[in-house]
Amino acid sequence: MAASPYATEDPQPPYLENTTTRGILQYKSASLSSSPVMPSLPSLHHTPTAHRFYTSLTSLLLPGQPTVPLHVDERMFITIGVGTLCKGGEEWCELIADRLVVTSMNNVSFRLPKKVSMQEAHFKSIEGVFTTDFPNKPPLFFDFTNASLHNGTIEESLEPTAIGTKAKKLEYNATVEIVLQSTAIVATQSHPMHIHGFNFFVVAQGFGNYNEQKVRSSYNLVDPQVRNTIAVPTGVWLMHCHMDLHLPVGLATAFVVENGPTPDSTLPPPPADFPQCSSLDVARSESIWNQDKSDGKDSYLR
């Protein structure tokens, strides 16, 4: 057995080490008449092979395990990618030097609160820390993964990004269908998305723009991948890109899950020694990466 790392595109230094790990598995019933053969591995950036591997994974059908819910209470279509903010706070700035490069979801660049945590603000009903108006869809639908958007007049009109601490409020035990759609604005990259506090089913993945009519028939509703670790709790839970570079500049949002009908589904009060947040200034980078063009690896995830 052999394995090597995978990266969607050539990164900036420091580069990912292109090494191969090897191991030999010997089954008790296997014949010892032949020597193991080292498999031939694809290149570090061979997307078709990586996609074929991780989309072929399924979950185990075990008694007592959660099954895919067929009734959906909330539907969200979330674009993820890169945009710009004006340094002076204006809605539009003509000079590139006056813009900050940020990341966003549905054109909202997430800003972490500075003095009070969202969880504390939610529990104590403190106003002014966050809002619950994170949009269910982007402000504009367009050809999201069109590589020709780069450095054109159309892209300039799509770059401006709002900033705020916006969350989505959900009822306890709600079933939410989320489509995550990458975009080609400013730069094209893949984004490993992570959500705190939840398990979720990955029922479809693909390239290009999400098309519900074409894709829905291919949903795996029998044994899809199940990602993350624990059940759905109450409280405030962050969803963000797992690339360290992207979270500080806004590629995140949060879900505020309301209390359920029982004591076990109700958020308990914080302990007496609950630490307080100190004043925190989150620096926002003026430049994130060189805007190299990728080879169309934008994708959707549902």
Image (tube, rainbow, N blue to C red):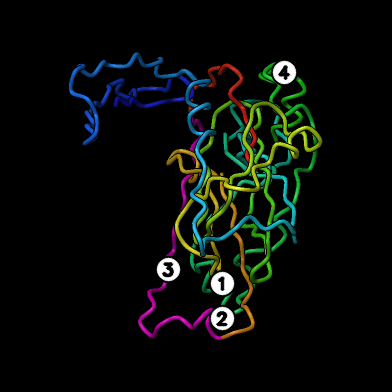
Q: Residue at x 52, y 74 (%)?
A: 120
Residue 259 sits above or below residue 60 on the image: below
Q: Residues within 10 Å of mark 3 (few under 14, many from 20)?
A: few
Tell me the distance, in whole angstroms, between the alpha carbons under discs 1 and 3.
21 Å
Tell me the distance, in whole angstroms, between the alpha carbons under discs 2 and 4.
50 Å
Q: Type of residue at label 4? A: Gly
Would you say 283 lies left or right of 130 here?
Answer: left
Q: Type of residue at label 1? A: Thr
- Point out the tag, 2 or 4, that comes first from the N-terminus: 4
Residue 209 sits above or below residue 35 on the image: below
- Quadrant for the N terminus in the image: top left
Q: Type of residue at label 2? A: Thr
Q: Secondary structure at mark 2?
A: loop
Which residue does the numbered mark 4 point to in the structure image? 152
Tell me the distance, in whole angstroms, between the alpha carbons under discs 1 and 2.
7 Å
Q: Residue 35: give x, y in percent of width and height.
A: 20, 17
The answer to whether the residue labelled 2 contacts the one labelled 3, judged by CB atoms less than 8 Å apart, is no
Q: Secondary structure at mark 3?
A: loop
- Point out the tag, 1 or 3, that comes first from the N-terminus: 1
Instruction: Say the numbered circle drawn on residue 277.
Output: 3
Q: Residue at x 70, y 55 (%)?
A: 134
- Point out the tag, 1 or 2, that comes first from the N-terminus: 1
Q: Residue 217: give x, y in percent of width and height.
A: 75, 38
Q: Residue 212: give x, y in percent of width and height.
A: 78, 38
